[in-house]
Image (spheres, helix red, strand yellow):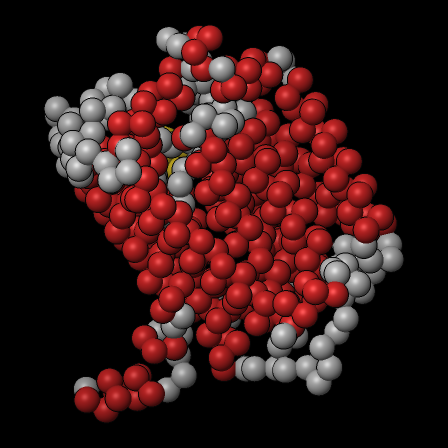
Amino acid sequence: MRRFITDFWHRPSPLRPLSLDWLLLGGCLALMALGLVMITSTSVVADNNPYGYLSRQCLNLLAGVLAGLFFLLIPLRLWQRRQVGWWLWGLSIFLLALLLLVAKPANGALRWFDLGVFKVQPAELVKLFVIIYLAGYLLHRRHNLRSSWKGVLIPIVSLFPLGILLNLQPDFGSILVLMGVAGGMLFLAGLNFRHLLFLAGLAGTLVAWLLLDGGYRIERWMHALDPWADRYGNGYQVIQSLIAFASGGWFGVGLGNSVQKHAYLPEAHTDFILAILGEELGFVGVLACLGLFALVCLRALYIGVRAERAGLLFSALLAYGIALLWMGQVLVNFAVNLGLVPTKGLALPFVSYGGSALLACCASLGLLLRIDWEYQQLPVVPADEPEDDRLPDWLQRLRYD
């Protein structure tokens, strides 16, 4: 037994504690711990079971740890196979289409598989599948990505069915996040300026069409800009969220002393958990939360930059995609809580209550830790740093120096 422990500690393995990126892992663990504390605080006012949400979130966390370990132990060469990416794309189409057929409406949307014991939101898993698919595609098409329109149009056309299925739920927030992630990954993979302008125009046209579709989204934007115009209707959540932030001040009213969580602010444990955090811990608490997100997102970008320097393009694009996904969801959630955009139903990564979101976040964390571990084991440093004419000279030096 002693020899086994010694061999396990010293041999190269992603499970060896000292092989992990503790800065990234520590930041994510701190966010999950903060989430458990705030979920307990927001749900303890429930009459029937004050610790029900906490116990279920602990089970979600256990499932997330298992998912993270799974992705940590799988070699990246498996995910970068072309057929694996297309299988994940097909699985995403199947899950979103099946959802529209069998899901029961909840809050006016079709977003969850109700399996009795728990609910699954496929959109959270689809985001990760799309990142893996795009990273594999851009790896295999990197030679004609900058010179051929075909190399650009294939991933865009392949993502259109996903956008249509998400719009039918409807889930406009996930569409916006996926568009941003896909655009960022295409740019970082080497998209030229002409193609970039085309994609920007296409994205703007699509967003305008989605906003005008049915007219209700424009109305929600107007109420987000002026929630007091419909204070007991569409503007109610935003007003209650702003009241929570205003009540918190600099240092908050104290952990557990929130007033807004007492049935004033709906979805206080999910979409608007940041507002309760701001009320109880104040501006300092919100700033600390934002600092943790900045730490993990910048660390994910750094892991991607190191992998790209070593010539590991798939690993780099995967890390970039995960970092962009986290940053997009954090920015949208912060904007919703501050009343800058209408409510989108996007959870705050690692913090909000929800099994599917936490599962996807932990799986993404496992991928990032695997990328970093493989970089440590197989460093490949190119002799000459490639010039990148997508970026200005000062940004090239910042990226490669």
Above or below, comparing residue 51 to residue 16 in the picture: above
Residue at 43 percent across and 57 percent down: it is 296
Above or below, comparing residue 207 to residue 61 in the picture: above
Say which of 210 and 169 sits in front: 210
Give coordinates of residue 83: x percent, y percent: 65, 58
Looking at the figure, which quarter contains the C terminus? bottom right
Residue at 46 percent across and 68 percent down: it is 370
Say which of 196 and 155 sits in front: 196
Give coordinates of residue 267: x percent, y percent: 32, 27
Which image quadrant for residue 13?
Answer: bottom left
Q: Using the rendered image of the protein, determine whether residue 272 is visible from the camera's viewpoint.
A: yes
Above or below, comparing residue 393 to residue 202 in the picture: below
Looking at the figure, which quarter contains the N terminus? bottom left
Say which of 395 and 29 sits in front: 395
Could you tell whether 124 is left or right of 115 in the image? right
Which image quadrant for residue 23?
Answer: bottom left
Q: Residue furthest bottom?
A: 3
Give coordinates of residue 331: x percent, y percent: 49, 40
Give coordinates of residue 30: x percent, y percent: 30, 55
Residue at 30 percent across and 44 percent down: it is 284
